[in-house]
Image (spheres, grey):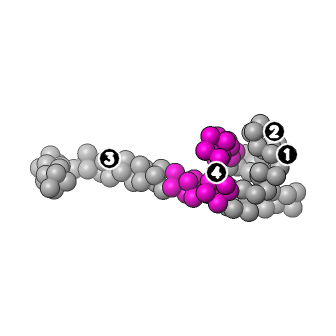
């Protein structure tokens, strides 16, 4: 089960995060909380993303829109790594002759 934190709990969990920053980052879609009757609800993944966003914004002085772009690229990189791991597992399950042919094709 995924834990959800309120806005105040999220701000407490990520010390460098301010309410102003959080509001701007929600508007820029750096993070997309779930909307509940009690206000925005943040998943553990959102909290981790916000912590990374704070580090990047502070280290590189990134505006909200630039930060959203950087995090989109990070997301794409993670998906590509997961896809590559899946492909590697599938290839490892194939007979050796197929693995050799694929390997030879990749070296071209």
Q: Mark 1 points at which residue?
A: 8
Asked which secondary structure carries label 2, the reply is helix
State the separation of the CA atoms marked 2 and 3: 40 Å
Given this view, does label 2 or label 4 mark the residue nearer the observer?
4
**Magenta region: which residues?**
47-74
Q: Name the residue under label 2.
A: 12
Q: Residue furthest right?
A: 38
Q: Does residue 98 appear in this view?
A: no
Precedes in sequence: disc 4 or disc 1? 1
The mark nearer the N terminus, 2 or 4, is 2
Instruction: Specify which label sits upstream in the sequence, 2 or 3.
Output: 2
Residue matched to label 3: 89
Q: How crowded is mark 3: few (under 14 residues within 10 Å), some or many (20 or more)?
A: few
**What residue is rendered at 85% in x and 58% in y?**
39
Work out whether 26 lies above or below 8: below
Mark 2 vs 3: CB contact within 8 A: no
- Mark 2 residue crowding within 10 angstroms, few (<14) / some (14–19) / many (20+): few
Which residue is the site of mark 4?
Answer: 62
62 lies left or right of 72: right
- The CA span between labels 2 and 4 is 22 Å
Q: Nearer the viewer, residue 29 or 58?
A: 58
| Along the line of sight, the residue nearer the viewer: 32 or 89 | 32
**Residue 10 placement: quadrant:** top right
Does residue 8 lie above or below 102 as drawn? above
Majority SS type along the magenta span: helix
């Amino acid at each position: 089960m995924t834990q959800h934190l309120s806005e105040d709990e999220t701000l407490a969990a990520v010390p460098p995060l301010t309410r102003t920053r959080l509001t701007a980052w929600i508007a820029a879609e750096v993070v997309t909380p779930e909307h509940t009757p009690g206000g925005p609800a943040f998943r553990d993944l959102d909290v981790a993303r916000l912590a990374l966003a704070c580090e990047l914004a502070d280290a590189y002085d990134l505006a909200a829109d630039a930060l959203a772009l950087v995090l989109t690229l990070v997301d794409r990189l993670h998906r590509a790594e997961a896809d590559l791991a899946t492909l590697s597992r599938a290839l490892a399950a194939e007979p050796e002759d197929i693995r050799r042919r694929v390997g030879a094709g990749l070296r071209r």
